[in-house]
Amino acid sequence: PPLAPRGPRHDTASFEIVLPETLDLPLVLCVCQARDAQAVRGQLEDVRRFTGVLSFPRLGPELAVMAETPDAANGVIQGPVLQALKSMGDLLDVLHITDQYNGPVLGFSKAPRKVLRMVVRLPMPWGNNVDAMMRAS
């Protein structure tokens, strides 16, 4: 299911990666901006039902981690994944890994259950300064 946009004037890109059904991954994990955690929990039923907000100081206070257990979060958010999330900063809207997915995925006639979904904000060359953008065009 699509997430509501975080705010006006922000283009986003959404990536859905279907995980193999044979992957032993009974997991629901979500990383999002801390200020958006309650809204994301309200929009994603599996996150609301199966996770809690965890303390994850390695990502800093800007990002919230919601997972079934701390071990599940630590198993996924390490090494290159940890570095990528830290470097994305405010561009990350949501990283959602689930074995409970119920939305459509392009190229699949039957909705897959195990999906990694990431929504990122596309940076604007002039930031949020619409006046500067209009002058440049």
Image (cartoon, grey):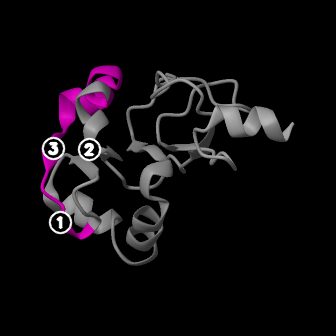
- The residue located at (41%, 43%) in the rendering is 96
**How far across and how far down the image is residue 66, in percent?**
23, 45
Residue placed under numbered mark 1 in the picture:
57
Residue 22 lies left or right of residue 74; in this view the side is right
Q: Are marks 3 and 1 in contact (CB under 8 Å)?
A: no
Decide whether the magenta segment is chiefly helix, strand or loop.
helix
Q: Mark 2 or mark 3, which is nearer to you? A: 2
Q: Amino acid at mark 2?
A: Ala
Q: Earlier in the sequence, mark 1 or mark 2?
A: 2
Q: Secondary structure at mark 1?
A: helix
The residue closer to the viewer here, 40 or 106, is: 40
Q: Amino acid at mark 1?
A: Pro
**Magenta stretch contains residue 54:** yes
Q: Residue 53 bears which disc, if any?
A: 3
Q: Secondary structure at mark 3?
A: strand
Q: Is residue 128 above or below residue 88?
A: above
Q: Is residue 66 above or below residue 105?
A: below
Residue placed under numbered mark 2 in the picture:
34
The residue closer to the viewer here, 12 or 52, is: 12
**Magenta stretch contains residue 32:** no
**How far across and how far down the image is residue 71, in percent?**
17, 63
**Real-space Cα distance between discs 3 and 1?**
12 Å
- The residue located at (39%, 40%) in the rendering is 99
State the extent of the magenta-drawn residues as a range. 40-58
Quarter holding the C terminus is: top right
- The residue located at (45%, 55%) in the rendering is 23
Q: Earlier in the sequence, mark 2 or mark 3?
A: 2
